[in-house]
Amino acid sequence: MDIPSDSVGFVTPTKVLFDRALPLSSGAVLHDFELMVETYGQLNAAKSNAVLVCHALSGHHHVAGYYRDQLKSEGWWENLVGPGRPLDTRKFFVIGLNNIGGCHGSTGPRSINPETKKPFGSDFPVVTVPDWVNVQALLADRLGIDSFAAIIGGSLGGMQALQWSIDYPERVRNVIAVAAAPKLSAENIGFNEVARQAIMTDPEFHGGHFYEHNTVPKTGLRLSRMLGHLTYLSDDGMGEKFGRELTGDPGDDYQFGFDVEFEVESYLRHQGDKFAGYFDANTYLLMTKALDYFDPARPFGGDLSAAFRKSKANYFVAAFSSDWRFSPKRSKEIVRALIANRLNVSFAEIESSDGHDSFLMPIEQYHQLLRGVFSRIVV
């Protein structure tokens, strides 16, 4: 495998055990838990150069680099993290983790419930963004990191970065929230509910205990991912990528049937099938609910500016012109709340036709902005 010179190269994840009780927002308690973690770069002597990367709905700990025993194993933000890249691992110690409730090695629905000696399945407790932030703080404690140089995330990851500055204002110096929102709109909650219903009504779901039946609700997962992809992309982007092109020869006529005929149908089915082959259905339910519940203004009577009253970080908030799911208008709500507290905040609306997925793309203007943000951070 040819590894780019500005990649972190081959990496190995580490599982970190926390032998302690973890109270959750729901009132449930995990008696102990594990986190799957990856790190890149070196933690300096002062432990002041750490950057936490928070993942989005289907993300995980493998942010950058490659695995020796797997082809096509590059990290999900490989284009951002590495020596000489915008998040430069020659300067920063970068941490990625799989949140609890996940399905990539951290404690989640597939883990064994100590009370039943079977996988948790749907008995795994609902988790929230504040729960994840609390766990990430415990990981920072384990690593001896008192304060993060920066916390960055896109989408649901950006929401975690914002929550950090609310819950642990003394422990984060810079927040980079990309393609995020202060809370979900009714439409977005509706999309999540349709996706959950597709999973929960799949006959193979078995009330969330499908592991015991040695099956997977693939049809539901497939439909959920297809719906998700439609919302992550923009109309213009889909038009540019697929148009009304047919899968056959250019001269072919319509088949007048329900098999795959248009390129966009083929793409969505491929993405759905791939996702259903590796992602856990119960994790998908948990992640979408965490999105629904995110509302940092709620404990403050709906006043978002009050939520940030104790915050001290510098902020960079970025949105993308074609992102209709978490539109620039939603990011500007965050910016106004930060300005109301006289916090140091920069905002950028970046031109892109890639929709919500833009935060994952190596868009030149976007990466130049991030490079500038990280270059100004003193460690």
Image (tube, rainbow, N blue to C red):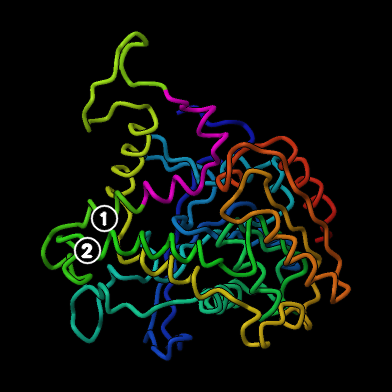
**Residue 238, magenta (yes or no):** yes
Taken as a whole, is the magenta stretch helix, strand or loop? helix
Q: Is residue 45 magenta?
A: no
| Few, some or many residues within 10 Å of mark 1 (<14, 14–19, 20+) | many
Q: Residue at x 59, y 71 (%)?
A: 143
> SS of the residue at dot 2?
loop
Left or right, residue 300 beside residue 156: right
| Real-space Cα separation, disc 1 to disc 2, in angstroms | 7 Å
- Residue most toward the right? 342
Amino acid on which disc 1 is placed: Gly
Q: Secondary structure at mark 1?
A: helix
Image position, residue 106 (x, y; %): 39, 67
Q: Which mark is residue 220?
A: 1
Q: Residue furthest front?
A: 256
> Residue 79: x, y in percent?
60, 39
What is the quadrant of the C terminus in the image?
A: bottom right
Question: Residue under circle 2?
Answer: 201
Q: Which residues are magenta?
A: 225-244
Q: Tag 2 or tag 1, which sits nearer the N-term?
A: 2
Mark 2: few/some/many CA within 10 Å (<14, 14-19, 20+):
some
Mark 2 is on which residue type?
Thr
* Near-viewer residue (105 or 120): 120
Residues at marks 1 and 2 touching, judged by CB atoms closer than 8 Å: yes
Tell me what residue is drawn at x 56 percent, y 66 percent: 185
